């Protein structure tokens, strides 16, 4: 009885030791990969931030009309800092994935390949959303100023509609790129877009007679202005 | 010393070859044209008569440069040429490329140099009040060495030219220290030397739109240290041509050019304080108190709408201190509406600083000035309504002084 108990203990200990001796190099490899990845991520972040600062990216974002909306969010750092952080986390994520792969665990087999297949689509979708955001801000500001200068009432409403139209379009394009419920997104977008246009047309025609008149009058006024000596230098 | 844009890059080779046969030409009267079929014949007639009458023994040329008219201007010019075989040498040049008025002006400046002319008069093709005597007034002082640049002064209704009286002239006065009346007056006389200086400057895209080239010419004359003289040309009458921009676009183009010039000539304007009047070749201009239909109510409404809806944009351009002075104006009834010149000067300088710092896309920023400009014009016209010509002159002087007073704040913020 005592001998059997000792054998079980020894064999269990040997088994655990054997398994640990098999896992230890992999664990060490994972830790090394994560550490190296972290160092590379820190260096890459610094290099990218310096390059972006040298390229005056924050000021350029201001020129493209991006900064006002950016700073209004109150949570986003400057574009340069944000890109630096993205680079850092992307590299660290890659290092962690490589580390997990080095462990050769059955449960995580194929995880890296799966993630790596998804990453390009994710990057493209993010780029689509950023572009849509820049475009939405630019166009909505242009619409706001244009509508106010044409003395059209409800200019902020028009600007808001323009902003959301572009953002919704961008969102639908990004989701399609990610392959998330592609048919549903296309269908929903088509219904929402078509419905909005129809609703606007009906609202403008039935309920917005005054606004329509105002817009037409402002167009006529613009034509008159070109004949008005006061508008000439 | 080569041109920034060689004449051959702008002017078709066959036109240059024709012009070479008339080289050198002592005098050039240049008419930049873009869709001026309604008025070009009248202006050409006056200028040709002026050259024939006042400079019969000089080798002169009437140079018409079309930037790409689409309204039959070319046919009108050719038909007038055929009907006037006795007129002084007329050359018509048709540019290819973008149809921008400033390209025609730039081509004239380049050709003045190419033709080795001594003096040039530049006259807008829509100036139907252009008289033959203008040719003498614009060219003679330059030929005699009494001036490098002749700037026009017109007799105007008080309601006319508010973009000049409330923005271009007082801003130019405060910046460059000269009380010039017209910064983009539609005509000018200048020496070949000045034309050469201007074509050496790096021309920006917005200079080629609207009045950018003319404003560049006037400003270069002021900063180059040459003799700038004003001459009184009488009443200014113009005919609108098809495709002329609306008020907001015109304001944005003019303001954009003025702010662009501020960036170019910073080293010159920064140390200048105060201003001095320019010498005049003849009687000073008077303002006509003739009544004109004024839509002050519409302008005040535009200002109020701007204050209500454009505030998020204005907050990015103007500091809280300026905005705090603007808020109460939105509550004033139309008949009591006012917009003090000092506040207006502050607003213009705030926009200039924001333009320089690229706080917004520049086109958006410039267009966001429109409701404020209309508010200022409404207040100005209300003040001018019952003014005598002398009081009106004082009113204009007051605006200029306000810009001079506010210049310190501009200097402190312009980095």
Image (cartoon, coloured by chain):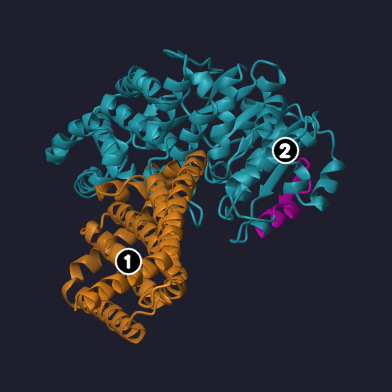
Chain colours: A orange, B cyan
Residue denoted by label 1: A167
Q: Secondary structure at mark 2?
A: helix
Q: From the image, which quarter does the N terminus of chain A lie in?
A: bottom left
In the picture, residue B379 is in which quadrant?
Answer: top left
Q: Distance of mark 2 from mark 1, alpha carbons?
A: 48 Å
Q: Secondary structure at mark 1?
A: helix
Q: Are marks 2 and 1 in contact (CB under 8 Å)?
A: no
In the picture, residue B29 is in which quadrant?
Answer: top right
In the displayed structure, would residue A23 be above or below residue A46? below
| For residue B209, side relative to residue A124 (left or right) | right
Q: Which mark is residue B25?
A: none
Residue B400 seen from this side: no
Front residue of A57 and A82? A82
Residue sitting farthest toward the right: B21
Chain designation of label 1: A
Crowding at label 1, few (<14), some or many (≥20) Cα neighbours within 10 Å? many
Residue denoted by label 2: B110
Chain designation of label 2: B
Crowding at label 2, few (<14), some or many (≥20) Cα neighbours within 10 Å? many
């Amino acid at each position: 009885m005592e001998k059997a108990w000792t054998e079980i203990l020894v064999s269990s200990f040997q088994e655990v030791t054997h398994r640990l001796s098999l896992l230890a190099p992999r664990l060490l490899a994972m830790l090394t990969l994560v550490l190296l990845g972290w160092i590379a991520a820190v260096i890459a972040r610094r290099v990218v931030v310096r390059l972006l600062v040298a390229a005056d990216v924050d000021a350029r974002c201001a020129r493209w009309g991006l900064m006002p909306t950016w700073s209004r969010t109150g949570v986003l750092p400057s574009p340069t800092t944000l890109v630096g952080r993205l680079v850092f986390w992307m590299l660290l994520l890659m290092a962690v994935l490589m580390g997990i792969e080095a462990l050769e665990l059955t449960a995580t087999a194929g995880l890296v390949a799966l993630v790596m297949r998804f990453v390009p689509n994710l990057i493209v979708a993010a780029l689509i959303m950023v572009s849509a955001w820049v475009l939405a801000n630019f166009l909505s500001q242009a619409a706001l100023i244009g509508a106010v200068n044409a003395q059209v009432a409800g200019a902020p409403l028009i600007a808001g509609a323009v902003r959301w139209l572009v953002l919704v379009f961008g969102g639908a394009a990004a989701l399609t790129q990610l392959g998330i419920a592609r048919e549903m997104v296309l269908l929903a977008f088509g219904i929402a877009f078509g419905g909005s246009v129809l609703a606007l047309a009906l609202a403008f025609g039935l309920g917005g007679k005054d606004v329509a008149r105002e817009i037409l009058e402002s167009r006529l006024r613009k034509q008159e202005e070109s004949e008005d000596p006061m508008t000439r230098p | 010393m080569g041109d920034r844009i060689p004449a051959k890059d702008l002017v078709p080779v066959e036109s240059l070859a024709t012009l070479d046969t008339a080289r050198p030409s002592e005098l050039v009267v240049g008419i930049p044209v873009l869709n001026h079929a309604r008025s070009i014949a009248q202006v050409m007639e006056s200028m040709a008569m002026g050259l024939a009458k006042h400079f019969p023994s000089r080798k002169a040329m009437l140079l018409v440069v079309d930037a790409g008219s689409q309204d039959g201007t070319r046919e009108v010019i050719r038909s007038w040429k055929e009907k006037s075989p006795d007129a002084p040498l007329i050359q018509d040049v048709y540019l290819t490329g973008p149809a921008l008025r400033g390209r025609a002006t730039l081509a004239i400046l380049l050709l003045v140099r190419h033709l080795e002319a001594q003096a040039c008069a530049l006259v807008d093709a829509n100036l139907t009040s252009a008289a033959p005597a203008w040719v003498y007034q614009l060219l003679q002082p330059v030929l005699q060495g009494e001036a490098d640049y002749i700037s026009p002064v017109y007799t105007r209704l008080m309601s006319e030219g508010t973009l000049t009286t409330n923005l271009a002239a007082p801003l130019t006065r405060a910046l460059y220290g000269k009380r010039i009346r017209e910064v983009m007056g539609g005509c000018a006389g200048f020496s070949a030397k000045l034309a050469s200086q201007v074509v050496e400057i790096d021309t920006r895209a917005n200079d080629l739109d609207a009045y950018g080239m003319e404003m560049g010419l006037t400003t270069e004359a002021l900063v180059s240290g040459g003799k700038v003289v004003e001459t009184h040309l009488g009443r200014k009458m113009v005919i609108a041509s098809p495709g002329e921009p609306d008020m907001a676009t015109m304001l944005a183009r003019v303001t954009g050019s003025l702010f662009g010039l501020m960036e170019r000539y910073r080293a010159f304007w920064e140390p200048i304080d105060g201003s001095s009047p320019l010498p005049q070749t003849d009687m000073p201009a008077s303002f006509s108190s003739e009544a004109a239909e004024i839509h002050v109510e519409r302008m005040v409404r535009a200002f109020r709408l701007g204050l209500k809806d454009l505030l998020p944009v204005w907050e990015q351009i103007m500091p809280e201190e300026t905005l705090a002075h603007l808020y109460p104006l939105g509550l004033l009834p139309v008949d009591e509406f006012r917009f003090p010149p000092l506040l207006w000067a502050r607003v213009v300088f705030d926009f200039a600083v924001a333009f320089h710092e690229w706080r917004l896309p520049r086109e958006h920023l410039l267009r966001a000035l429109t409701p404020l400009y209309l508010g200022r014009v409404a207040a100005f016209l209300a003040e001018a309504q019952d003014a005598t010509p002398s009081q009106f002159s004082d009113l204009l002087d007051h605006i200029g002084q306000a810009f001079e007073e506010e210049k310190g704040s501009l200097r402190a913020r312009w980095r």
